[in-house]
Amino acid sequence: MMPAQQGGSRGLVLRGLAKEYVPGKPVLRGIDLAIAPEGITAIIGPSGTGKSTLIRCINRLVEPTAGQILLNGEDLASLRGKALRLARRRIGMVFQEYNLVERLTVMENVLSGRLGYVSLWRAWLRRYPAEDIARAFELLDAVGLPEHATRRADALSGGQRQRVGIARALMQRPELLLADEPTSSLDPKTAVEVMELLARLTTAAGVPVIVNIHNVELAKRFAQRIVGMSEGQVVFDGPPEDLRPSHLQQIYGGEDWL
Amino acid sequence: MTATPDAAQAAARQAFAPNWMARAGAVALAAYVVYAMGRLDITWARLVTGIGEAGRFLGRMWPPNFERWELLLEGMLESIQIALLSSALGILISLPLGLMAARNLSPAFLAAPTRAFIAICRSLHYVIVAILFVKAIGFGALAGVAALTVASMGFIAKLFAEAIEEISMKQVEAIRATGAGLGKVLLYGVLPQVASRFTGFCLYQLDSNLRNSTLVGIVGAGGIGGTLFAAFKRFDYDFVAAILLSIIALIFLAEIVSGRIRAAMR
């Protein structure tokens, strides 16, 4: 099963990943992480600690300053042009504010997950392969929006939009799914429902997930592994049951809120 | 004058600071208007004779004379053709220009010169551009089409660029994250966000090109304007009236049609 590639191991390996938006002010200070090719890994930490930057470095929406990003053995940090686009299509992404194309229909948004695979011409004329369209309908059924294919994305509620966002990411048949605060714009009940959906569908598809999340309770409930970040560094790494108040104090600072 | 202490205090604390600069500016403007009217010989007596002349002129325009309708129709059709062609060309060229000028998607080394080029297209009035083209490529509709194409480029390319600069980059980011290249990002991330505004701009430009195409004929660049100018010079005021009424009817028609299209786009 294991492809014989340089670097060898399956899953995602970050080595010495660093990012400075302003020289001399590092946001990420040499992150070393190995993520198994299965399960949900939650990254927790205070706002502004580099969680979003970390996740965006992995699919290179943000350019890392230094370090390696090995996805199933291939270093993504050095890719350019077409090679980078081919790498991106293997990585699905779910966003805090859904980032659906508002004026396109739900179906067009879901199918946009195939943009890395179809030609420009087909994309323009919406001539997607029949199996892509069938899969899009399957995913819409799976996320609980079977009747919404032809509605415009801006007509949906927040929870519905995030479900479309999940369907779009899974449409890529990704080897890794990144989720950047997927529940922060949702009410508590919808947040749990969306996390449940994300966990169920990615487990069924065998896709590993890295999720940035503010809500520690949600992280403990859905993740098999928790990574705590503070000031651009990993300060906790372990299963949810090992996470103690002392760790939270170290991650977020202070103790009055606990 | 026995103000209570409270009122006196309130008066001392000014709620609205006097703006002496604005007041001085208003006085200076008023003074300049009086001076300019004197310089340009705008007097009451002049105005009264002027109104009398205008009355006689309007009297000679009535009733409008549509006897030479073939000439009129030919001119109007040429004007419409100039407007349509120059709008289509202008829009076609403006699409890439607007994209290249948008500072959020285009690199600075491309955006800056493109913006400069668009500014040059805008800086000269289209009648001046029409005169230049008449001198360069000769009398006729081609000069009018060229002039109005340049004018359209200057106008819509700038509006396109501004519309693109206002899009949500989050949607663009999401499309980039799927592994889409530039063309697909434009088709899925950018175009849907700007399409309805672009259509609005294009209709507006077609509207103003219809108006403008009736004028470029005066400098010999084709269309009804040439016929109008000739009728003026021969004192055929009744024919002038017929032409003016036709132009007004055309603009009204265009207004109604573009209003319908805009409403349907929403």
Image (cartoon, rainbow, N blue to C red):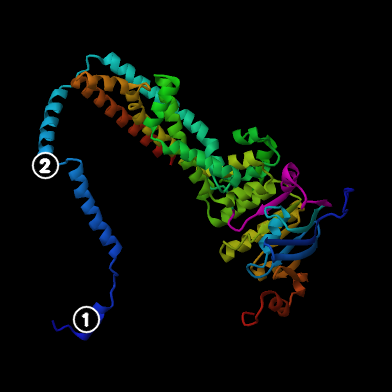
Does the magenta-highlighted stretch encompass residue A109?
A: no
> Who's the residue at 22% across and 46% down the image?
B36
What residue does disc 2 label? Answer: B44
Q: Position of residue B198 (x, y in %)?
A: 47, 39
Q: Earlier in the sequence, mark 1 or mark 2?
A: 1
The residue at which mark 1 appears reads as B7
Residue B61 in the image: above or below residue A41: above
The residue under the point 73% across, 58% down is: A65
Residue A236: x %, y % from top left: 76, 72
Q: Are marks 1 and 2 in contact (CB under 8 Å)?
A: no
As measured in the structure, the alpha-carbon distance from the residue carrying label 1 to the one carrying label 2 is 49 Å
| A79 or A24, nearer to the observer | A24
Q: Residues within 10 Å of mark 2 (few under 14, many from 20)?
A: few
Residue B234, numbered circle: none
Q: Secondary structure at mark 2?
A: helix
Counting from the top left corner in percent of width and height, residue A9 is at: 86, 55
Q: Which residues are magenta?
A: A73-98
